């Protein structure tokens, strides 16, 4: 197995070095070849350049700095397309996603098509209790209207086989667009293509360094619009 960890970044200079080092340490607990693919959208704080300078001797750390194309989901798409691994992990770089879960995710891939970190699986949780509760309510809404048996569409920490995405036609820009709404589409189409899900407990930690890129009002509008479009597609197919 070859693992590619995809890290989309924008203004994460205070997190990027430490998170990569922790990912490397976590992968060291399993026996596999790996690469870490950083896709930086030309951050004003020079995240990409800092990463290149620090890891310039490490050929397993690949850094792309995009100067024309931008966007969270498109950065993930770009990273997966460029990756060499047959197994893909997508995670954030602000420490909201615990690198220690990587070996667990990989071990579970034998029994499913995608492993998802979930705050609402047994023993999962979130540091920000208000955000945790609001997200739980919204995730229940998504689960109810899309009829997909997963509890967390919004965490964005997952492991999937690249060959599965390609075989099912799911590695395309129509899915990987926008912000976190891309994962709602991805989960929908994985489910429609007969893919199997497995959730493992994850704990959401509030960021220590940097500023969140989340605009909650915009996210609520966009995610609801996406979910209703998918619902209508189901009804009128």
Image: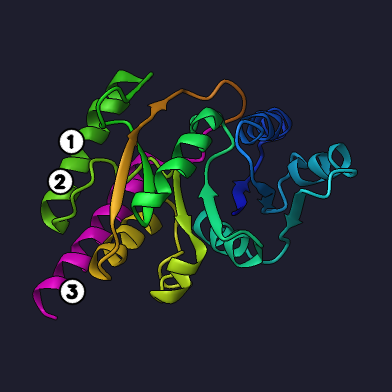
For the residue pair 228 and 99, the one nearer the viewer reads as: 99
Residue 149 included in the magenta stretch of the image: no
- Residue 6 position, x and y percent, is 60, 50
- The local crowd at label 1, few if under 14, some if 14 to 19, many if 20 or more residues have their Cα within 10 Å, is few
How many marks can you see?
A: 3
For the residue pair 91 and 11, the one nearer the viewer reads as: 91
**Residue at 42% across, 73% down:** 174
Which is more N-terminal, label 2 or label 3?
2
183 to the left or right of 210: left
The residue identified by callout 3 is 233
**Residue at 29% across, 63% down:** 195
Tell me the magenta residue range.
212-237
The residue identified by callout 1 is 137
- Residue 235 position, x and y percent, is 9, 73
The residue identified by callout 2 is 141
**Residue at 50% across, 57% down:** 73
- The local crowd at label 3, few if under 14, some if 14 to 19, many if 20 or more residues have their Cα within 10 Å, is few
């Amino acid at each position: 197995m070859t693992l590619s960890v995809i890290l989309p970044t924008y203004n994460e200079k205070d997190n990027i070095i430490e998170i990569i080092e922790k990912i490397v340490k976590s992968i060291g607990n399993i026996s596999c070849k790996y690469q870490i693919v950083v896709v930086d959208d030309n951050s004003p704080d020079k995240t990409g350049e800092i990463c290149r300078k620090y890891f310039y001797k490490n050929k397993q750390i690949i850094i792309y700095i995009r100067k024309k194309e931008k966007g969270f989901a498109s950065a993930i798409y770009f990273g997966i397309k460029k990756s060499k691994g047959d197994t893909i992990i997508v995670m954030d770089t602000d420490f909201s996603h615990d690198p220690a879960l990587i070996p667990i995710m990989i071990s579970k891939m034998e029994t499913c098509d995608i492993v998802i970190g979930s705050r609402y699986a047994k023993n999962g949780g979130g540091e920000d209790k208000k955000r945790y509760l609001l997200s739980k309510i919204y995730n229940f809404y998504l689960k109810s209207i899309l009829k997909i048996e997963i509890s967390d569409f919004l965490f964005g920490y997952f492991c999937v086989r690249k060959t599965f995405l390609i075989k099912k036609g799911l590695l395309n820009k129509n899915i990987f667009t926008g912000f976190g709404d891309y994962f709602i589409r991805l989960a929908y189409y994985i489910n429609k293509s007969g893919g199997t899900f497995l959730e493992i407990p994850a704990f959401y930690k509030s960021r220590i360094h940097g500023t969140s890129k989340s605009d909650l009002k915009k996210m609520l509008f966009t995610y609801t619009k996406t979910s209703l479009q998918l619902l209508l597609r189901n009804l009128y197919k």
